[in-house]
Amino acid sequence: MLNLYITGAAGSAKTAMAVGLGLKLQQEGYKVSYFKPIGITTATGYNVDEDGLLMQKVLGINHPIETIVPCNTSPFYLTRYHQNEEIIGKITSAYNELSKDSDVLIIDGAIFPHAMASMKLDVASLAKQFNAAVLHMIKIKNDFSLDQAVFFNRYFQCHNIPVVGNVFYNVPRQIMAKTEGVYKEILSDNGFTTLGIVPHRSELTVPTVEQYYQILGGEILTGEDKLDLPVEDSVVGAMTIESALAYLRRAPNKAVVTGGDRADMALAALETDTSVLILTGGLYPDVKVIAKASEKGVPVILVHHDTFTTIERMTQVSNRIKPGDEERIKMAVENVEQYIDWQSIITSLK
Amino acid sequence: MADFKTFFNPNSVAVVGASASPGKIGNAVMKNIISSKFKGEIYPINPKGGYIEGIKAYSSLSEIGKPVDMVVISVPAKVCVGVVEEAAGLGIKNLVVLSAGFKETGSEGMELEKRLVDIVKKNNMNMLGPNCVGIMDTITPINASFSSVFPNKGNIAFVSQSGAMLVSLMDWSQETGLGFSRVISLGNKAHLNEADFIDAAADDPSTSVILAYIEDVTDGKKFLQAAKKAAAKKPVIVFKSGTSQAGAQAASSHTGALAGSDLAYETAFKNCGIIRARSITELLNLATAFSSQPIPQNSRVAVVTNAGGPGIITTDAIENSSLNMARFSKDTIETLRQNLPAEANIYNPVDVLGDANEDRFEFALDKVLADSNVDCAVVLVCPTAITDPVAIANTIVNVNKAYPEKPLFTSFMGGTTVEEGVKIVSKAGIPNFTFPEPAIHCIKGMIKYAHAKDNLERSEDSALHYNDVDPRTVKAVFYDVFRDKRRVLLGSETYEVAKAYGIPASPVKLATSADEAAKLAEEIGFPVVMKVASPKIMHKTDVGGVLLNIDSPEKVREGYFQIMDSVQRYLPQVLPYGIEIQKMEPEGTELIIGMSRDVQFGPMIAFGLGGIYVNLLKDVSFRLASNLTIAEITSMIGETKAYTLLKGYRGKKPADLGAVVDVIARVAKLVLDFPEIAEMDINPLFAYEDGLSAIDIKITIS
């Protein structure tokens, strides 16, 4: 029985890694199972952990979702502090169930490695309990992201938790060179291994209008059938119309956020490559704007928040792999095959 | 353009939705057609039948059983489609749809409007509207509208996007005596638009002046074509509303179309010889002037006045409008001196003094108009106790008849005292203004038109043509950019594009690592410029993204990280593609050549002083790229202060003007060949004594 704990910050592609590695190992003849001790439920989403549902389907796990994800958390969970014993009990029995009939158990980390540390349910505590080795996922935002990775690696080391290595996932082309030339080297100087650097592939990470709508709520005024358009960029239309066109033209497949009363801005956006028009302030646009948008096949979402709140919410949109999304599931496996030294993961687990 | 053979002079008109109840539009139209003394057949259509305004009504178009040239429709929007289908089936060609409830009301209305247009296009019909007031033609005559007033017969064609403006103006014209040949309310412009009617008015022998009120242009290309053709024959005066930021926003919500930039309208109007009125008052003044007076041969204005102050005011206005005060010939001056009182001013402005009677006015005006140094005249009449406005007015009318080729304007300055005099000159077609400035503005407008007409005649020469351009390379570059899901080209890519079109650009190469940067710098040769490569960064200097004069491989390596770190500090979300390495070029005169593709009129080229002060100095002139000629480019450069610099300012050697003209022409060629280029900027473009070098080129594609 091999236990691999995938950890990393939110958005570091833990799930994509679990999908890719899990399927790869199945192809290699291993019996693979998936366990996410601490799941997360979103305010607008389902009441169960979406990753759990995904992995249950992808790996064909014959256990109920309550076993795969025995416990869920949210940013406000500490009122349940006294239920510590009960939760640990649930997690332990779920682990026992899942580990029974598998060669490799992929354990997926909570939203952050430190989540639920107050209840000793953080990644390090659980990894120790399950005797698991850690695979750390790194998403580079800036140099501090690397510091964070080094810090976690060192923390695991101090607690005698084996780290099989680190993976940089979704690395934009622009910082590929720095990742290979600088970050990898620094990790190595600190005694930590890099198992792979996976380049950014927009197909894997670009969210759709639908995902924005789920986060923002509001009213779809037109284009209900176009919610699958990709959103690659966003532009706030608050400038004068003369300068707006230059900004709008620079961004492809974008969401344009502007006030419902800015008919001129909305029309300018519709002249350029726009995937969704998000009108703020609960101001209904002129009928001609809606007519033009439906003519161009661009969805219009009316939200009741102000522009700032809307943009803040939009930053929460992340693109998760959904069950049945064969293309992206396939791509996750390809990434593991092409860019990650998965053989040495197996070797080090043995 | 549409075939208007029977649109303005139908032999028969059917009114669908004709009504016997006063207060209904279907009733107003019937009354209007009848009272306009329309000579053809009138067929009211009403399912109830009976008689409407004394004419037998039919239950449907089909029931008429005789050919119908035009159908005026005033039934609810939903019913319109059926009516238009029926008309199409009967082979009727002309439709005037007054009904509202279409595009202006939302998606449902837009659908209905689309269906109308589909039927109309399929059956080669002409449709005005929907949502319009109708048409009026004083020559035919016919008043197929619900305007309360039918205008006087005249030579002005008026095309209006606003029904309200049209109705008000018609009412106002009754008072001033302005006459119209035809009047068109455009409505939603679903099928026929301003271009069609300007084009038709150009061919109309009864029209000598075309007037238009517009909020937007439906089809820029077609509009330019129609306006150019018209302006070559007769003056086209346009008032375009929505010029302010808020106004443009209002226009957008009114028309449902994105307003093109006002600058583009200005440039387009200039391009096709349109005289642009800045206010409704100016529009009407110009209409009055053009419809009643000839175009002056030149800009030399004579002023005859009976008061000193107004003479000075008028002189100021003439000079400030870039017109010239006429300088009389020696003979004229001598004759004036001998025959006018000693205190009179015999030079321009001629002051015949406050005690002048009609004889003195007649003498002075006749002498100055006879002078070949005078192209037009303004007479100022100030009502003193001795002045007899009626007698003076009659005199002016007589003198005007003797000089029909020289435009004449009057300003009877006052109210009730001069009222009768004003009536006399106005009736004789001499435009009168209460105060002199508008008269001068009118002359300026006429001179502008004369110049524009000249330009149109001269610009017939060939379009820009180059054999040495390589569109395939450009296409390949754009393909790669699109594939990379970008809209903005990197410096290394714009260099390829520029090179392919013979635009002299300083070479740029992209490095994705410090070592590569050093290697490329050695290839290019030191010293070099290093610039961050990112389509997301508009102003690279502001984020520490540019290093100049780097002279060694070590410094290039160091610079690579310096720029990357600085950019990341300022813009943590932006991930640069790398660093562009470019040769450090010697400084020249900094110029800018820009292009922005206007939604209505297509690519618009800008030229002026470049560098970081572009937005501050605003020394830029504009032209539309389509039909741009070398002569136009030269005149475009001449409009800027940059031109003064290029000629050699304060001992500096002149720059290579020919090369500047060539680059502008090549940019125009590039943006015309590639409609996917949405924006382009060369800033700075260094101009040297010999040749040029484009330092920074930005291209956005879509």
Image (spheres, grey):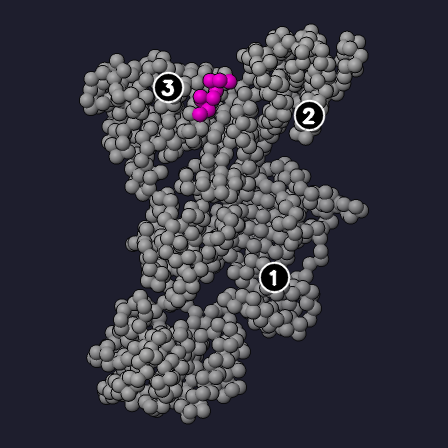
Tell me, yes or no, whether dots 2 and 3 are on the same chain: yes
**Which residue lies under the disc numbered 1?**
B542
**Which residue lies under the disc numbered 3?**
B143
SS state under label 1: helix
Q: What residue is rendered at 63% in x and 46% in y? A: B618
Say which of B6 and B295 sits in front: B295
Chain hosting mark 3: B
SS state under label 2: helix
SS state under label 3: strand
B27 to the left or right of B646: left
On screen, A126 above or below B100?
Answer: below
Most prominent secondary structure in the magenta stretch? helix
Residue at the extreme front of the image, as rendered: B385
Q: Which mark is residue B199?
A: none
Mark 2 to mark 3: distance in Å?
43 Å
- The answer to whether residue B171 is magenta is yes
Q: Nearer the viewer, mark 2 or mark 3?
A: 2
